[in-house]
Image: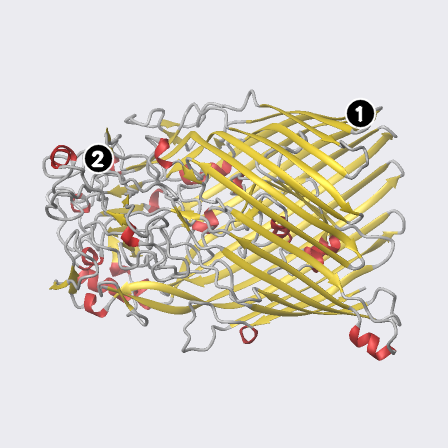
Amino acid sequence: MVNATTVRELPLNGRSWTDLATLQPGVDAIHTQPDFAAGTDRGNRGFGQQLTISGARPQQNNYRLDGVSLNDYANGAPGSVLGGNLGVDAIQEFSVLTSNYSAEYGKTSGGVVNAITRSGTNQLHGSVYEFLRNSKLDAKNYFDDRTLPIPPFKRNQFGAAIGGPIVRDHTFFFADYEGIRQSKGISTLAFVPSQNARSGLMCSNPVGADPSNPCATTQITVDPSAAEYLTFYHLPNGPILGNGDTGEFTFVGQQIVNENFLTARVDHKVSNNDSLFGTYMFDKTPYASPDGLNNVEFTTLTSRQFAALEETHIFSPGFANSIRIGGNHEAVNNNESLKAINPDAARIDLGVGGAAFAGRKAAQVLVGGLSDFTGGVGGSPTYFYHWNSIQLYDDAFFTKGTHSIRFGVAVERMLLNVLADTDPNGIWNFDSVQGFLTNNPTKFQGGIANTLSPRNLRQTLFGAYVQDDWRARPNLTLNLGLRYEMSTVVAETHGKLANLRKITDATAHLGNPFFSNPTLKDFEPRVGFAWDPLRNGKTAVRGGIGMFDVQPLPYQFPLLVTQAIPFFSYTVVKNPAGACSPPLNPCPSPFFNFGGQNISFPANRLRTTYDQPTPKRNYVMQWNLNVQQQLAPSLAAMLAYVGSRGVHQPFRVDDANLVIPTKTSLGYVWPFDSSGNPLDPINPNFGSIRGMFYQGHSQYDALEAQLAKRMSHGFQVQGVFTWSKSIDTSSASVAGDTFGNSISSLHWFDMRLSRGLSDFNVGRTLVVNGTWEVPTPKSLAAPAQWALGGWELGLIFTASDGVPFTATWGTGSDPANTNSGDDWAFPNRLSGPGCKTLTNPGNPTNYIKTQCFAIPTAPDVAFWNQSCNPTPPSVGGPVAFPLCFNLRGNAGRNILIGPGVTSLDFSLFKNNYIKRISERFNVQFRAEIFNILNHVNFAPPTTPTNTDIFDGAGNLNPVAGALTTTTTTAREIQFAVKVMF
């Protein structure tokens, strides 16, 4: 439980009340969420700061405001496009339930984050405030150009809160407005072709050669179409990397954000036995930012509204009932690219052309070793979400003797409308810089815009519970609960659903139902106890075990149902040269612009969906045991073990349509034909298959410790430590790459291959927070007392391990011959000297020890002759023994650990009470310093740009292991004035 004073006085960067959850043991912020840069990845997974609570996926938590679920359309943490939740001054009470909570809480198998809004009183009270930041007060980010001034940054966060009586003793109000006006320069590091590469002077490093030796140079002819697209890659203004084909380009892009937030609450006392309250919240945030290469400006808009109304009636001293209705609305325009920064981004003649892509601008270009070009104007995916949740709760409270009983029901109607304009300009994939410059694509894909139509998803969730907290003995209380919770199968209002009943089916099942309902028997028993063994009220032993169902809610399906033929045509052409119909087959060059050629996209190049039609019940078992000991009147310690096991968890892959490999003594080997080309995928009737399997498993074990001193003598402090391990076979619910360190299409045919640390696993976390009202000397004269009195200090210190990530190779060029539209290959891990650990901490240029990885190899000539591909298409020629490109390497999922996080946020307040106005009138001056130690907290390498150890031809990737972003800001200083009355 966090009280209102702590909520308002701790140094919170962004003043978001949901950030307080990380002060509790077992709660970690996920620092590998996709960032807010241009692109749909963050928006499609939710903008709020996601949390993992007791090892649960962030989509398995429930956020409640005044008893009503506030989860967003992605079923994650609520938040504006900035990721936070304003209104700190309107929060009265905040709490986090991390494990084995009572049966009254549903729609969750993770944690419950509760907040209660402030009420008015008979006395008028409130505050007016402004918080100011600008670049003159801040330190440079690690990636800022040291030769240039710090990027411009200006932020004003201002607002006012007021509460008081409407009708004295009966009706009260409280209202809070908060606004943000922000313009922030963001240094972006990109990898671009070098001047030599642009001129066709390339490094030729034979497969298997020593990467430390100088490579021979080769002159190539740069294709005219590729030369046109070089306009989107600036010349390097930083170091030339690796073999000289690529270099660093850094620029400062300006992010513009204006946020307006309002919340209001009215409480009314009808009688001594009857009361009600109503809450309303509104938040609107437009956002603009350039893409990662500074070619196009992207805009995103989040608009949120929330309302709750509750009536409580006391029928007798032992019986009361509360009925509550609520609504949660969110509208998101995610990633619209309407304005060209580079004029060439608006050119139609650079588009793919043809009837399917007529009038579109430049396509996206993904090149191994280069930063992604996300397309010209209108080229990046754009998603429009309209989310409505209508909720009804009825809770009864009955006390008789030693029994305290609660029972009730909950109904939630969910409406999610989605319009997904996916890759409307198309995407070209190239395996290497040379492949790009010679216009030799490995894949083309894109959504045909004239087939676009919305999906209107509908679902109802129903829950009922009974909870008995029985005081069996004076020193023993048993917590006995049972919850029943079921949901209807997600339906589309016009039947625009397509789903393969078997992954090998030639045609999809159309319309509702999307799958059979696995939730009809979801009874959830929960048992706990609280025991005072010494009978002195100073020692408590608590424990419990319970079942928590994971409901298949609408958030899981937008990226599945919006891209399936026949309701939307998305093509995946794995051999672009064969995309044209006779007599233009193969297509004449250039591939970059098909122009008026007769392009054909038959069914076997289009995308569909496979959502396991008969899913099993998805649930999580949680258990915990903790001991709490009061050490002093205001000091207590806690030690706990917390565990959980998840069964039949969602296992999401972006493309399940691949060749099923052969299992050998050395692992899985992908077959090939006589020319070395891949065989047909498991379902040759489609180009790609978005897949959802309910076969994942998870486990979590944690040791938690807490030492807390409650407020006394003006001082409070709390320290929490969590040492945990979260293991699963997949962490994906929304998309295959739910997090920035995720692999978007894990190999689903054998889930044991992907068992490893969860994408959000954080091994050890220490968080300390505290506030201190510095005592005022009493013996000094009034001026000295004023100068030395009223000071207050606050801090939040966080230190945690990094999250895991996976070593890959050749992404996009399919060196293993999987024939997947979303191919992934894994290298071999070596065990030579220095390879016990796989990373170089403190080395942002070469964070991965690339010398500890190799292309998979055969153990002997016999195996190589029988199983290995002598002419991998990604090489364009023969390879020699022992190289075995089509062998799945032994480097497993998430075996590398990214950099940790260390941050100290500090605040200094000066309270100035002006008693001539009133006893409570206070002009408070605040200085808050975030990351006061200016510690650089790097994000893990970007997947796959910097996790690919080799390109598809087997050459060392020059940017392998490079760290390009940070998870926290450099030191920022914020000044504020707050007037409280």
Query: Is residue 467 shown left or right of residue 585?
Result: right
Please state the horizontal and vertical placement of residue 25, each as a whole percent of the image: 61, 45
Indicate the secondary structure of the residue bearing disc 2: loop
Residue under numbered circle 2:
670
Taking the spot 43% from the left edge, 23% from the top edge, the residue there is 614
Q: Can you name the residue that lies furthest to the top here?
A: 521
Please state the horizontal and vertical placement of residue 639, each as a whole percent of the image: 65, 41
Circle number at residue 553: none
Taking the spot 53% from the left edge, 73% from the top edge, the residue there is 135
Look at the image and tell me whether residue 46 can be seen: yes
Query: Is residue 232 shown left or right of residue 132?
Result: left
How many neighbours does mark 1 have within 10 angstroms: few (below 14), some (14-19), or many (20 or more)? few
Residues 619 and 354: in front is: 619
Relative to 309, residue 914 above or below = below
Residue under numbered circle 1:
473
Please state the horizontal and vertical placement of residue 534, each as a whole percent of the image: 78, 33
Residues 480 and 87: in front is: 480
Question: The C terminus lies in which quarter of the figure?
Answer: bottom right
Query: Is residue 918 shown left or right of residue 50?
Result: right
Q: Amino acid at mark 1?
A: Arg
Looking at the rendering, which quadrant does residue 974 occupy? bottom right
Residues 658 and 637: in front is: 637
Q: Amino acid at mark 2?
A: Trp
Indicate the secondary structure of the residue bearing disc 1: strand
Taking the spot 65% from the left edge, 29% from the top edge, the residue there is 544
**Which one is closest to the eye, mark 1 or mark 2?**
1
Query: Is residue 573 shown left or right of residue 546?
Result: left
Looking at the rendering, which quadrant does residue 697 occupy? top left
Look at the image and tell me whether residue 223 can be seen: no
